[in-house]
Structures are given as structure tokens and as C-alpha cells.
């Protein structure tokens, strides 16, 4: 019985840039095709939120736990 084949570890070269470590494939260009014309559209934004949005104490505690340092930096402590 033959010994199992060991795969070689792939290591990037020492001087490889981080961008070169990822293998992104670009879509092939299709010469001779034209892009579709963009149709100008007018968007309407509707704000249907109530003037006062209810927030629970639990939601406030979560935001303070995750963003408390940022809030203190922006708005000051207290």
C-alpha cells in the first residue's frame, strides 16, 4: 500500500501585498455590446414614521453597552 500523499502548504511570498492574496475574478468584457441607456427617474421619499418613536429600556441598554464609549466621546459624560 502506498503512503498517503501529503499536500503542500501554500504560503504567500514574503513581499506579497495584501491585495494580491485575494483572487478576485473580473467579468470578461464583451466587445461590441452597448450599455443600456439609463432612464431618468424621479424618486419620492416618504417619511411615515411617527414624531415620537417608542424605545424600550432594553434597547437603550444595548446601545449603551456597545456604543457607550463613542457616546461619551461625542456628547460628553453625564
Image: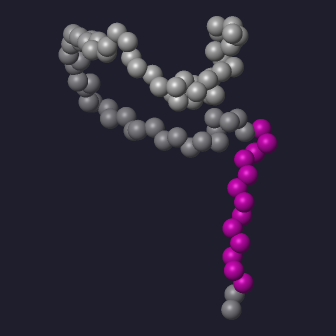
* Quadrant into which the C terminus falls: top right
Q: Residue furthest front?
A: 57
Q: Looking at the image, which residue is at 57% across and 29% down?
A: 62
Q: Residue furthest bottom?
A: 1
Answer with left or right where residue 10 lies relative to residue 50. right
Q: Looking at the image, which residue is at 56% across and 43% down?
A: 23
The colour scheme of the drawn protein is: one colour
Tell me, yes or no, whether the highlighted magenta stretch contains residue 4: yes
Q: Main secondary structure of the magenta part?
A: loop
Front residue of 42 and 36 = 42
Q: Position of residue 8 (x, y in %)?
A: 72, 64
Tell me, yes or no, whether the highlighted magenta stretch contains residue 42: no
Q: Looking at the image, which residue is at 45% across and 38% down?
A: 26
User: Taking the image as drawn, is residue 40 in sight?
Assistant: no
Is 62 placed above or below 39 here? below
Q: Position of residue 27 (x, y in %)?
A: 41, 38
Quarter of the figure with residue 48: top left
Front residue of 72 and 1 = 72
Q: Position of residue 72 (x, y in %)?
A: 68, 13
Front residue of 21 and 50 = 50
Counting the numbered discs, the total is 0
Q: Looking at the image, which residue is at 31% across and 13% down?
A: 50
Quarter of the figure with residue 61: top right
Write the start and end of the magenta stretch as one range: 3-15
Answer with left or right where residue 45 lies relative to residue 63. left
Q: Position of residue 14 (x, y in %)?
A: 79, 42
Answer with left or right where residue 48 lies relative to residue 14. left
User: Taking the image as drawn, is residue 48 in sight?
Assistant: yes
* Quadrant into which the N terminus falls: bottom right
Q: Residue furthest top?
A: 75
Amino acid at each position: 500500500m502506498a503512503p498517503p500523499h501529503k499536500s503542500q502548504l501554500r504560503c504567500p511570498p514574503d513581499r506579497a501585498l495584501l491585495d494580491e492574496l485575494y483572487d478576485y475574478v473580473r467579468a470578461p468584457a464583451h466587445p461590441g455590446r452597448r450599455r443600456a441607456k439609463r432612464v431618468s427617474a424621479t424618486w419620492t421619499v416618504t417619511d411615515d414614521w411617527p414624531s415620537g418613536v417608542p424605545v424600550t429600556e432594553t434597547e437603550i441598554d444595548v446601545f449603551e453597552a456597545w456604543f457607550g464609549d463613542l457616546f461619551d466621546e461625542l456628547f460628553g459624560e453625564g
